[in-house]
Amino acid sequence: MKYFISLFSVFSILFLNLHSLEIKTDNESLPISIEKLQEFEQLEITTTREKNDKIKIDIWSGVDLISLLKVNEINDFAQLKFISDDNYLVRLKKKEILQTKPIIALQRNGNDLQINEIRLVVPEMRDMFWIRNLKTIEVELLQEAIFPNTIFLAENNLEKKQIRKDPEPFVDVSGYFFNDLIENIFPFLDGEFLIVGRDGVQHNLDYQTYLEKASLIFEDGKYDLKSPSMPAGMWIKEIAYIQLFDRGILFMEPFENWKQIKELLKWNNVPDEFYLFSENEKQEKRSNLDFRDPIWEKALKIKWIEK
Amino acid sequence: MDRKIKINFTGIVIVAILVLLLFLSACESNGIILTGNISAGAKITESGKLAQLLKEKAPFTEYALLIGADGTAALISEISFSEIQLKKDKNSWYSSSELLPPVCNITDIREICIYQPVKRIIDIKTEKNGKILLFSERIKDFELLGESQKNGYPVRKYKIKKQEIEY
């Protein structure tokens, strides 16, 4: 009997993991089975996408995300974090959810989707947001972005390190491990790193799941962030900025001045002055200083001067 | 009889001196221990602004983790050091600030773990076991609960992972 109960428990856990979606809040975790999702009213939406130069039209049927949240009494949130079974991650702000009315699709063009095909469909947003094999929805409350007090300059800090040929597991490339860059900059690694590409794509990623094994692949004077523990769709092309808590790392190459950085990172303002540190020197500079000025050649970090 | 009283009186004086010495040494040991990237044995024994108190003992400090007896801790960075006061109330220490987020107000502070860049502290003296528990190791004993900011001053709130802290 004991053996039977244990077997049943293991089977139940496996079954639950394979067949349920989980909504996580600060206080609780709510498993929702596929059967439960099927009990909801099924909405139908038609999407048009361009794939490989062809127009693709799909009819999706599934559960209205907003209704699912309401039923579970989730009203107070700033954004939702969606994570797939292979750790693909996207975030949608509350405003985006209310505007685009996403569904959790259970059918595509009249055919039932397999368990690992169930996906979030977000009309009017690029299909990189349409996360497939959805496993977890995490509720996140509003958090005002922290402005970095100190910014390290990536290229000049990396120059002091030996470039790696074929940083594992990537081959026929050269670059650095992510850890090469961040060691001696961040004395703690908990919490989520903000990672931003020059094209504005950004992710908030925790170190252990996504970044510990990541590499910065160097090509044509730019760095791409790739990691074996990140689905390739999340890799960041031409990485521009990294931040953890109040400390940032800036890749200067893609920029000409602070104004461009301010626009990309949606900072309200930048202070007028900063200290610029090189190996043995500290100078006071104004933030209208162009990045092509030779003064930046040996600069390792800056600290804003608040007046 | 007189002699007996005299001896007792001397004894009382000796005991009183001993008690006083014990009391003074107890007061001395009531300072806040500084750990992390700093020579072992450093303490804060006076009230004042954190920036001022660290100026001589740990001049390159960039982060400080203020740790309370109940395992609650607040991580602040150097821009906040001049805005936070360490004060003594009877035999316990607490931090207070009006500008910083309220989580910076830690009661019964027992330890402040500080981060100074390692290259700045090459001559650091080791602890009794021959190893220093660097800031980056000590902070792993704590679980991050969240981040907040007020008036442009950010803070991280932590809670110790173990149930008991020994000081």
Image: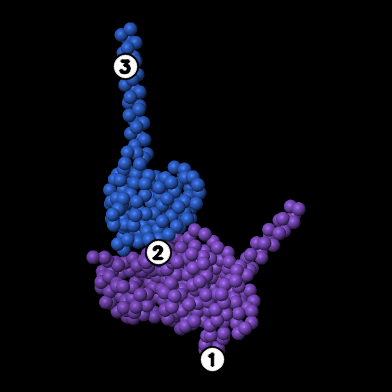
Chain colours: A purple, B blue
C-alpha distance separating marks 3 and 1: 104 Å
Please state which of the two labelled residues, at mark 1 or mark 2, is closer to the viewer.
1
**Which residue extends farthest left?**
A307
User: What residue sits right under mark 3 in the picture?
Assistant: B9
Image-quadrant location for residue A111: bottom right
C-alpha distance separating marks 3 and 2: 63 Å
Q: Where's residue A191, x and y in %?
A: 46, 63
User: What residue sits right under mark 1 in the picture?
Assistant: A55
Q: Is residue B70 visible?
A: yes
Chain for numbered disc 1: A
Image-quadrant location for residue A84: bottom right
* Residue at x 42%, y 45% (from the top left corner): B69
Please state which of the two labelled residues, at mark 3 or mark 1, is closer to the viewer.
1
Q: Amino acid at mark 2?
A: Phe
Question: Same chain, marks 3 and 2?
Answer: no
Q: Viewed as shown, does residue A302 lie left or right of A45?
A: left
* Residue at x 34%, y 30% (from the top left corner): B21
Mark 1 closeness class: few <14, some 14–19, many ≥20 residues within 10 Å: few
Chain for numbered disc 2: A
Q: Is residue B116 above or below residue A166?
A: above
C-alpha distance separating marks 1 and 2: 43 Å
Please state which of the two labelled residues, at mark 3 or mark 2, is closer to the viewer.
2
Q: Where's residue A239, x and y in %?
A: 44, 77
User: What residue sits right under mark 2 in the picture?
Assistant: A245
Mark 2 closeness class: few <14, some 14–19, many ≥20 residues within 10 Å: many
Q: Secondary structure at mark 1?
A: strand
Q: Secondary structure at mark 2?
A: loop
Q: Secondary structure at mark 3?
A: helix
